[in-house]
Amino acid sequence: MPSVLLPEGAYRRLRELAEARGLNVEDLILSLAVENAGPEEAGRIYWEAAETLLAQAVEELAKGRLRQASEKIWGAAALAVKAVAFWREGRRLISHGELWAYVRKLVDESGDRELGRLWRSAISMHVNSYEGWATLEAVRDALEDVRELLEKLRCPRGEAGQM
């Protein structure tokens, strides 16, 4: 993933802006990147970020950094759902509640109850990133669940958005 070097003052300002919005700096930057993008481009940006986070989760897991792996697993799932919402409806999801509701909508529309289970596995990793209670096996299982979630959300052309 490309890196950006910023002066300390600029990074502090970005962190302040992010915190004011309830985000981390990376999420703020992603949010700004999709702000004026069309639905297709915004979906593509979120989907690429989801795949990148999933790859980073594998690296963190290999290093035994379970909390970091957990946060990346959760982030990959959340960004994938955001990508689908953009591509299917041009809709921007901004809260955990909106993510939950959208996954419920996908489950209802597709009849695939497994989507809900996979989503809940991802949510458990969000909790684990704060609590640190999950075992290596639990994090590994959640990683596999989120890989499966992304596959279910991927459309036949290999892009997100059409189930």
Image: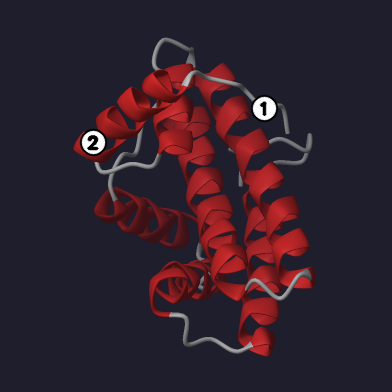
Q: Nearer the viewer, residue 139 or 79?
A: 139
Residue type at numbered disc 2: Arg
Of the numbered discs in the image, which one, if any, rests on residue 21? Answer: 2
Q: Residues within 10 Å of mark 2 (few under 14, many from 20)?
A: few
x, y percent for residue 57:
68, 60
For label 2, the SS is loop
Query: Farthest residue toward the front?
Result: 8
| Residue lying at 63% horizontally and 78% vertically, measured from the top left | 139
Q: Nearer the viewer, mark 1 or mark 2?
A: 1
| Residue lying at 52% horizontally and 19% vertically, measured from the top left | 6
What is the C-alpha distance between the residues marked 1 and 2? Answer: 23 Å
Of the numbered discs in the image, which one, if any, rests on residue 3? Answer: 1
| Residue lying at 79% horizontally and 70% vertically, measured from the top left | 62
Q: Are marks 1 and 2 in contact (CB under 8 Å)?
A: no
Residue 102 versus residue 113 in the image, above or below: above
Residue 58 versus residue 17 in the image, above or below: below
For label 1, the SS is loop
Q: How many marks?
A: 2
Disc on the earlier residue, 1 or 2: 1
Of the numbered discs in the image, which one, if any, rests on residue 20? Answer: none
Q: Nearer the viewer, residue 105 or 6?
A: 6
